[in-house]
Image (cartoon, grey):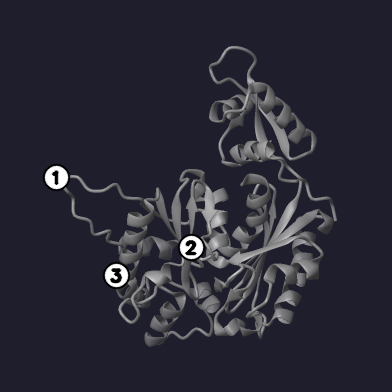
Amino acid sequence: MDAWPAVTTTERQVLALVSGGGDVTQSDIVARTELSQQTVSRVAGDLVERGLLLHGERVSRGRRGQPSALLALNGERLFMLGVSIMADAVSATLVDFEGRERGHVFAQPQPMSRAMVLESVRAAFGRLCDEAAVDPARVLGIGIGITGYALPGGRTFNPPPALDDWVGTDVAALFGEAFGRPAWADNDGNVAAVGESLVGVGRWARNFAYLYIATGFGGGLVIDGQLMRGTHGNAGEFAGLLPTQLYASPTLGLLRHCFARAGEVHETIADMLAAIDVDAPAVDDWLWRVGDTLSLVCGASAAIVDPEAIVIGGRLPRGLAERMITRIDMRQTPRWGVGRPQPKIVPAEAEGDATALGAAILPLKLNFFG
């Protein structure tokens, strides 16, 4: 396996600005930081020499002197594997240094035991590298997102019954040993929020709440561009806001139940999502049940966190997220004719499998862009 690149704090600062999207030059970095022109020039030159950055065309910013060269991440420099462990399926995504998806594999091993999941991921890893023509030695790390909240210490998780074999498992250590690479693990809501921060809403919102809707209901908080994990790694567990028995949790399990009530039975959530019509009467039924829940959680997030955006994401098709947004009532009373500023409520913008993509981006964010 290729050597893991080590970067300094200043190099991370430069890489983070380049990764934020848009055209960025050395002069732009000087203007946005307290770094001198000489320091930025030296650091950028070193990063280009090491293959982490590329020089692009020269552009003028209306300043005197020679136009500055655009800087861009070198997507071919290294790759990451992202793994999503769901209650009913596992998926894997290959991501390059720019955060672009290079391939995705979805599987439904039965049972969802550690052995079966590892076997599925090994097969997916080989297939992804073959199809993308990527040497496996250039895949330098693995990120894993797993359904379930973190237990004390942050290295083990409390998953749903379908993942009982994973209770008490150090997920990162398991994958690190199995694949001979550094590995990082977090719950699915957190890693999806991380992915969104780098290649989605995070490109225009430094502060957002990410509502992760799948088998369960959770999420993540991104504050000033960084994931806020909290004491135990469970910040953003929005389901904890809901009084027991009073509010229906907006899960895809409940949506599957609504389809079954309407006579459309799906064996798994994955099967339901593959066939879903977001305008079906069963969806109307589900939205009626969860509308108050969504309004409560979004209103609480706006009041407590004051984010720029609230992102509706997870395992949802975009059309379903858009329909959910129309049911959200922020329920504020203006004072002197003026209401409190409210966040934008938007569908997730990161494309693809939210958890697998975010899991692959997690090591990049932690080690290069954090």
Query: Residue 62 appears at what percent x and percent y?
Result: 53, 17
Who's the residue at 29% across and 70% down the image? 292
Labelled pair 1, 2 in contact (Cβ < 8 Å):
no
150 or 45, which is in the foreground?
Answer: 150
Disc with the residue nearer the chain's start (1 vs 3) = 3
Query: Residue 142 appears at what percent x and percent y?
Result: 71, 61
Label 1 – label 3 distance at C-alpha? 27 Å
Which mark is nearer the camera, 1 or 3? 1
Disc with the residue nearer the chain's start (3 vs 2) = 2
Query: The N terminus appears in which quarter of the rendering?
Result: bottom right
- Indicate the secondary structure of the residue bearing disc 3: helix
The residue to which callout 1 is attached is: 336
The residue to which callout 3 is attached is: 292
Query: Residue 39 appears at what percent x and percent y?
Result: 68, 26
- Indicate the secondary structure of the residue bearing disc 1: loop
Label 1 – label 2 distance at C-alpha? 34 Å
Which mark is nearer the camera, 1 or 2? 2
The residue to which callout 2 is attached is: 235
Height in image: 303 above or below 186? above
- In the picture provided, is 113 more to the left or to the right than 213? right
User: Does the rendering let one see residue 249?
Assistant: yes
Q: How many marks?
A: 3
Q: What type is the residue that disc 2 sits on?
A: Ala
Who's the residue at 58% across and 12% down the image? 64
